[in-house]
Amino acid sequence: MIHFGVLFQILSSWHSFRGRLANRRLSRSVVRFKGIFAVLALGTFLSGCGALNHMIYKTTGDVMQGFSREHTIPYLMKSGDLAMGCAMSEATAPLLMSFGRVTSEPDQLAVMLYLSAGGCAEEQGREHELAALAALYEGNGNAAEDAMIRQKRAYALASKRYFKSWQHVNAFYGEPGTGECPEFDDDMDEFIYLAGLLSGLQALNSEIQSTSSIGVPKNVGSIVARATGCLDNEKWWGTPMALKATVWSMMPGALPEGENAFERLAVADRQGEEAGVRLSHVFHAIAATNKGDEAQVKAVVRQHADSLDDRAANEDWAFVDAMATNMIVAISDRLWVQNTGHRTPLGQLGTFWDDQKAEVETMDLDGLL
C-alpha cells in the first residue's frame, strides 16, 4: 500500500512536470514566433537595403561631382605639376565615372578626366617616338622598329581616351559647331567646353599617328573650328583663334578667303604671352611642323622660351601654361634627337645645335692712333 504522503509527492511531481512541459512548449512557440518575426523583419530590411544603398550612393556621387567641379579642378589648374595631374586622372577616373551608374552621368568631369588621361598616354607615345629617333640616329633598326610599335600603341590608347572626352562634350553641351552656342553658367563651364574642343582635335591627331582606326569622325577638325566661335578669344588667351587657325592651315580648302592662318596664330601668340597662358604657341608650332617649316618651328620654340623669362604663368591657369611648355619641350626634343641623338640640353630650351655664336674679335684702337 502506498503511503498518502508518498502519493502526494508523486502527484505534486507529476503536476510540476506537466507545468514545466507546458511552459517549455509555450517557450518553444514563443521562440519559434520570434524566429519567424526575425526572419520577416530581416527580409523586410534586406528588401529595402538596395534602395537605401542606392540613395547613399547617389548622394555620394552628387557630392563627389560637385566637389570635383567646384574645387578639385580649380585647385589642379593652379598647380603646375603635370605628373600629379596625370596620375590623378588615371587613378580616379574609374571611381568617379562609376557614379554614373547611380546618379546622372558626370559628363563635365569626364571631359577633364579623359582629356588628362589621354595626355598621359600621348606623353608615353612621345617618349617612344624619341627612343625610335635615337635608335635611328645610332643606326639600330630593330630597336627603332620596336619603339615605333610601342609609339603607335600608346597613341591608339590616347586617341580612345581623347575620343571619350569628346563624346562627353557632345553629351553635356550638345553637338558643337551646329550654329547654336551652349549657355555657360560660369568661367569653369566655358573652360571645360574649350577643353572638350581640344580633346576632339587631339583624338583625331592621335588616331592618325597610331595608324589605326579608332572611329574618330574625320570632320572633327571643321566642327571644332566652327565651335570656337562660342568662346571669347581674348578671355581665353587667344586659344580659340589658335585652334581655328591651326585647322585652317591643316585642312585643304578650310582657309576662308582673305584670311592668313599664320598671321592669326601670331596674334594669338601675343595674347597668350600677355595672359601668361601660352597654349597658342603649341598650335603655332604644330601648324608650322605640318607645313614642313622647320625654321618657323624653331622660331616659335625660341619665342616660348623667351616669354617664360619675361612673364610668369597665370596663377589661376598655371597647369595649362605648364602643359603648353611641356609640349613645346617635346617639339624641341624631337628636333634635337633627329639631329644629334639626344634631347634638348637641360636649361637650354630655345637654343639649337646649329646656332652660330660668332665670337667677335676686339681690337685696341688706341694703339693704332
Image (cartoon, rainbow, N blue to C red):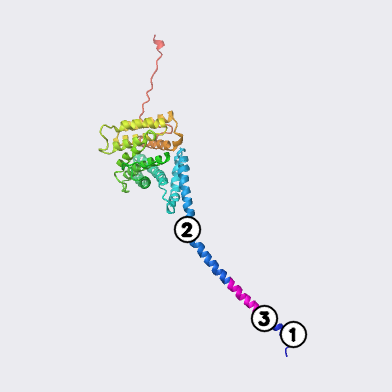
Instruction: Identify the residue position indicated by label 2 in the image.
Output: 51
Q: Which quadrant of the view contains residue 277?
A: top left
Residue 91, percent from left and from top: 45, 48
The residue type indicated by label 3 comes to: His
Q: Residue at x 52, y 67 (%)?
A: 40
Q: Is residue 212 above or below residue 263?
A: below
For label 3, count other residues whose C-alpha is less than 10 Å away and answer few (under 14), some (14-19) or many (20+). Answer: few
- Magenta stretch contains residue 20: yes
Q: What x and y, as percent, mark residue 211?
A: 31, 46
Disc marking residue 5: 1
Query: Does label 1 or label 3 sit earlier along the sequence?
Result: 1
Number of other residues with Cα within 10 Å of mark 1, as a class: few under 14, some 14 to 19, many 20 or more = few
| Stretch in magenta | 18-30
Label 1 element class: helix
Q: Which element is circle 2 on? A: helix
Three-letter code, disc 2: Ala
